[in-house]
Image (cartoon, rainbow, N blue to C red):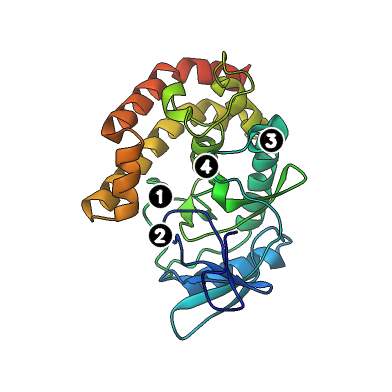
Amino acid sequence: MTGDTGPADSHELAGGMMNAGAVFRRGDVVERPAPPNARALHAYLAALRHQGFDAAPVPVGVRADGREQLGFIPGYVALPPFPRWAMSQTALRSVGVLLRRLHEASARVAVDVSAGWAGDLADPEGGTMLCHNDVCQENVVFRDGRAVALIDFDQAAPGRPVWDVAMTAGYWVPMRDPESAAPFYPVPDPSHELDAPGRLRLLADGYGLSPRERAELPEVVEQAAAVCRAFVARRVADGDPAYVQALRDRGGWERWDRIQSWLSAGREAFTTALLA
């Protein structure tokens, strides 16, 4: 949370690139720009609660001025450069546990095929349940070092559970080469790199990924990285200043080339760790 930069009785909430500077908390309600399918998303969030998943925002409503209102969830989110507590094994495993809870509830909610779900980060193969698709650090609420809630369902779309795990792994393992990870992800010992295969296994264990899905996961992670790259490319081509600046600051397309090469080179090590 930052200072009082909005209306007199509200506070700006920090985090994220797409709605930066446009999300405010007013009492127990968060107000933010409504996505085009806000009403369908609110119906989905209400259905999740009906299925016993209480770890997502309570939908309040959509205002006439195009802003949506959601219940505020107290806790902490990790912002880059990420704090050490967000990189603990406990935190990582708890993200997997929380994602599994979401999927178990989401699988029991009928998908509104007319809702116009976001396609930017969606599973190219589709699916019969809604995935979150953007379980990044800024969209996970923590208390006492454990993930307790997910926020910002703007990118939700039908997909496979393993796709959502792969997207989540990209952020939380993280599934990127040490040079790309270094500016944002702390390591326990500066002389050592993050153990990506071991952390990928820990996320899969927390989720309870099946043997078949474990065998698929490294390849799906590569597929997800390509989708994320295409998303950034579209934003940059559209002249989105936040993405143009981020691409410039984070090493340009060379960084994305390096990540994709690293993922391909590490596929066997990731598979071995997952199936050990």
Q: Which mark is residue 80?
A: 4
Badge 3 crowding class, 10 Å Cα cut-off, few under 14, some 14 to 19, many 20 or more, is many
Distance of label 3 from label 1 (alpha carbons): 23 Å
Label whose residue precedes the other's in the sequence (4 or 3): 4
Q: Which residue is mark 3?
A: 93
Q: Nearer the viewer, residue 114 or 243?
A: 243
Label whose residue precedes the other's in the sequence (2 or 3): 3
Say which amino acid is labelled 2: Ala
Say which amino acid is labelled 3: Arg
Where does the image place residue 39, in percent across and percent down from the top left?
Answer: 50, 75
Distance of label 4 from label 3 (alpha carbons): 20 Å
Q: Which residue is mark 2?
A: 118
Label whose residue precedes the other's in the sequence (2 or 4): 4
272 w.r.t. 170: above or below: above
In the rendered image, the quadrant that contains the N terminus is bottom right
149 w.r.t. 11: above or below: above
Q: Nearer the viewer, residue 23 or 56?
A: 23
**SS class, disc 3:** helix
Label whose residue precedes the other's in the sequence (3 or 1): 3
In the rendered image, the quadrant that contains the C terminus is top right
Callout 1–callout 2 Cβ contact below 8 Å: yes
Quarter location, residue 88: top right
Where does the image place residue 127, in percent across and percent down from the top left?
Answer: 47, 51
Q: Which residue is mark 1?
A: 121
Where does the image place residue 228, in percent across and percent down from the top left?
Answer: 37, 42
Say which amino acid is labelled 1: Leu
Badge 2 crowding class, 10 Å Cα cut-off, few under 14, some 14 to 19, many 20 or more, is some
Given this view, does label 1 or label 4 mark the residue nearer the observer? 4
Distance of label 2 from label 4 (alpha carbons): 25 Å
Label whose residue precedes the other's in the sequence (1 or 4): 4
Quarter location, residue 262: top left
